[in-house]
Amino acid sequence: MGDVLRFPTTAPARPAPRPAPEPAPVEPLWREAAGEELRQERHRSERTLADVAEEAGISVQYLSEVERGRKEPSSEVLAAVAGALGLRMADLTLRVARRMHAVRGPVCLAA
């Protein structure tokens, strides 16, 4: 009939997979950066969501959503929250610009 072919009982070694390159950071949306700045300032001043929301004249839920970058607040709301935290709008805007400038990723084209 013919010769018997013997196959190895173990699989041949495969080269180790290359690690995936780390994705570049994506530029945050302005509302996300502003919300994070407001949250950090609130924490620095050791104030609660309820306290700041009441002083700003908005609901706790809405302030929470602003801080998490879920809502696109009007300039009036931003000014009220910033004011409740002792910030001027110019200060908040500068902080947000610095935060966004620090991210060296691709430009966000999300609508």
Image (tube, helix red, strand yellow):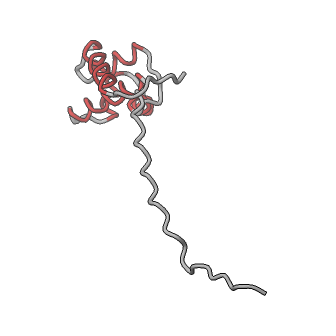
Q: Quadrant of the N terminus?
A: bottom right
> Residue lying farthest left?
45
Residue 18 vs residue 108, the one in the foreground:
18
Residue 8 vs residue 31, the one in the foreground:
8
Left or right: where does residue 67 sit relative to residue 90? right
**Residue 76 position by quadrant:** top left
Left or right: where does residue 21 sit relative to residue 97? right
90 lies above or below 44: above
96 lies above or below 19: above
Residue 11 in the image: x percent, y percent?
55, 73
**Residue 10 position by quadrant:** bottom right
> Residue lying farthest front?
2
Residue 23 in the image: x percent, y percent?
42, 39
**What is the tally of numbered marks visible in this picture?**
0
Residue 5 in the image: x percent, y percent?
66, 81
What residue is drawn where x is 54% and y is 21%? 111
What residue is drawn where x is 30% and y is 31%? 51
What residue is drawn where x is 39% and y is 28%? 105
**Residue 99 position by quadrant:** top left
33 lies above or below 20: above
Residue 104 vs residue 69, the one in the foreground:
104
What residue is drawn where x is 37% and y is 18%? 78
Left or right: where does residue 80 sit relative to residue 44? right
